Amino acid sequence: MKLEKLKILVEESLSNGKPQFDTINPIEVLFNPNRIEISKIGWKQGFGGTLTAADQPATLSVELFFDTSLVGLKSSDLGSLIPTIPSLSLLPDIAIIQDVRNYTKQIYSLTEKKGILGNRPPICKLVWGTNTVLFQGVLKQLTKSYTRFLEDGKPVRATLNCSFEEWEPPETKQKKLNPIDDPIRIVKRGETLSSIAAEEYNDPSLWRVIATANKLNNPRRLTPGQSLIVPPLPANSIT
């Protein structure tokens, strides 16, 4: 079975208030992390022990490891990469270690403003495996550490400590704030519960929320024109 890599889908445009992600050229980590932490403050305790919703976004922390000395190119590969100079493939077969910044700069750039998005950083979606959305938010803070260098000073090993802050579409926040008004949705031809969950909750894996609310015995069998209740998203479904 092919090893699935953690990928970061980056917002490339905004359409009707919803981010459109670049799914063709995602940022793929060099090595999968062994730990991901998601933190959420749900409630605040006030005077007299009263509890009120904190209404604070969740945060995701992850440490990403990069070491290009473990994945270096070989000189015999250069003939295929640069066909105009085929003689390069005849060089002694030695490892050619890339600058680790060729990889880390993609993630570092997520903290920077993009003019096409109105001078703000892009929204990111962390995906691991098929339709497994771990988190959606902006890269709020990043600490980059270089821990190995070649003789010429080129960095080849780096650790990136990343902190993402959750971002939700306005309509998703409204659903959570209004638990009484369960909107009705009419199924269109070709729609599935996963596609509806992706549109309503921005996460296709939350299709079970809709299936449970509508008591669907066979969630794959939807009929065009069928009415569905799309309930507010439970707070514990965010993570």
Image (spheres, rainbow, N blue to C red):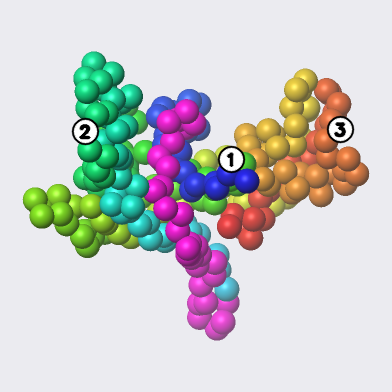
Ranked by sequence position, the earlier of labels 2 and 1 is 2
| Magenta segment includes 42 | yes
Q: Amino acid at mark 3?
A: Arg
Instruction: In the rendered structure, find residue 221 and report the number of the disc placed on it.
Output: 3
User: Which one is in front, 171 or 73?
Assistant: 73
Q: Position of residue 51 (x, y in %)?
A: 57, 73
How far apart marks 2 and 1 lie (CA) works out to 51 Å
Q: Which label's residue is closer to the chain start, 1 or 3?
A: 1
Q: Nearer the viewer, residue 4 or 143?
A: 4
Q: Image quadrant of residue 42?
A: bottom right
Outermost residue, top side: 84
Q: Is residue 174 left or right of residue 227?
A: left
Q: Secondary structure at mark 3?
A: loop
Percent position (x, y) of residue 162? 35, 57
The magenta segment is 21-50
The residue to which callout 1 is attached is: 202
For label 2, the residue is 91
